Amino acid sequence: MAQWEKKIDIHKVFVLQPTRPTTYFGVGAVKKIDDILAGMAAAGTDRFLVVTDAIAYQASGAWSTVEPALKKHVAFEHYDKVRPNPTYANCEEAAAMGQSFGAKAILAIGGGSAMDTAKTAAVLMKHPGQKSVDFYEKGAAITGAMPLVLINTSHGTGSECDAFAVAQSDGEDKPAINSPHIYATYTIEDPALTATMPRKQTISTSIDAVNHALEAATTITTTPYSIGLARDAIRLVATYLPTAIVEPGNLTARYWLLYASAIAGISFDLGLLHITHAMEHAMSTLNAGVTHGDGLGILMPAMVKEIYPAVPEVVADLFAPIIPGLVGEPRETDFVVEKLRCWCHGVGQPTTMAGYYTEADIPALVKTSMASSLSKMLFPLAPIPVDEAVVERIFRNSL
């Protein structure tokens, strides 16, 4: 028996269910788009807004299969201006295109940014006259969304499996929305679409999945289901990331990294997230050059230093493939942090934010973190009380 199992409150009732999308997973899954579009068109959903960035939808190889299926079954307009850390304006621009065209559904191709843009646009199109700020900051009820088809080209986001979306506000904030209405109707997970990812993105997206798993398994809202999925996700990343780095076209490695990302997404869809996700959003808000996965990897060891004494049994079990021999006791904290940094460095993931920030930037990072709406949502879910001192220590220990 794992040590953390002894601490589970068996009287705590939770929702044990898979996520909502019908997900097609495996090499060649992108070919299912023909059946999906044919079925939706036959049911009357015959006008689509396609949402992508300017590059990945073609570079991944997805477009060579998707475009003929679109032309065969439906009418469509293409919004290809997705950017990393999409803003309210980006989402509203996409929604306006969809509304003008009379789109009845949205198909997104890409990673988390494309999916966040598509999900937000799907909400906006169902609520004419309202703006992103109404849902992200003013608490407007989400009563529906356009149907979503998500084709994932990254093994890090998890967004294809969850009911969350994130966008950058007009100020210094990156709030989130959560609604069952933004689960996709269909998701395609084809490992072949991730084979062209650059080395740096291969690493950072995989680290993103590890962070999803780590946080989901250590929230105060976690469940045995979330912990079990998280444990398997981290094991798979530890096993297959080294191969994907040196053999980017190895589809077996890509398969298992994509699977790890998906189950980590399912894990946090129910278990939720906490510290590093809130703090990384401050990092990338103040410096758009910080990619999500890279920021999370930089913060992860310093965050583990804070939470390990509170949840050593769970973290020891999660990190067993990376740091064997842990017994799950608080006295191991410094050893775990050191070994975790070594593992990150071994796979090419930095654990210092010196490339983005200096010590002089810490007050602004702390202030942005503490003020963000995402922090107000996630910090209370951490296994420790999170105050300004904790946040400052994590940033300082990440320099």
Image (tube, rainbow, N blue to C red):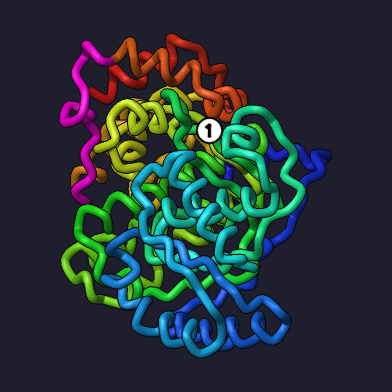
Q: Is residue 298 above or below residue 210?
A: above
In percent of width and height, residue 19 lies at 66, 60
Q: Is residue 354 magenta?
A: yes
Q: Is residue 141 visible?
A: yes
Which residue is rendered at x = 54% and y = 53% of the image?
Answer: 95
Q: Nearer the viewer, residue 247 or 138?
A: 138
Question: Which quadrant of the figure has residue 176?
Answer: top right
Where, quadrant-wise, is the C terminus in this rendering? top left
Q: Which residues are magenta?
A: 347-361
Which residue is rendered at x = 54% and y = 78% of the image?
Answer: 75
Which residue has dot 1 on it?
Answer: 175
Question: Which quadrant of the figure has residue 197?
Answer: bottom left
Q: Is residue 5 visible?
A: no
Which residue is rendered at x = 48% and y = 26% of the image?
Answer: 307
Q: Is residue 351 left or right of residue 123?
A: left
In percent of width and height, residue 326 lies at 41, 40
Amino acid at circle 1: Pro
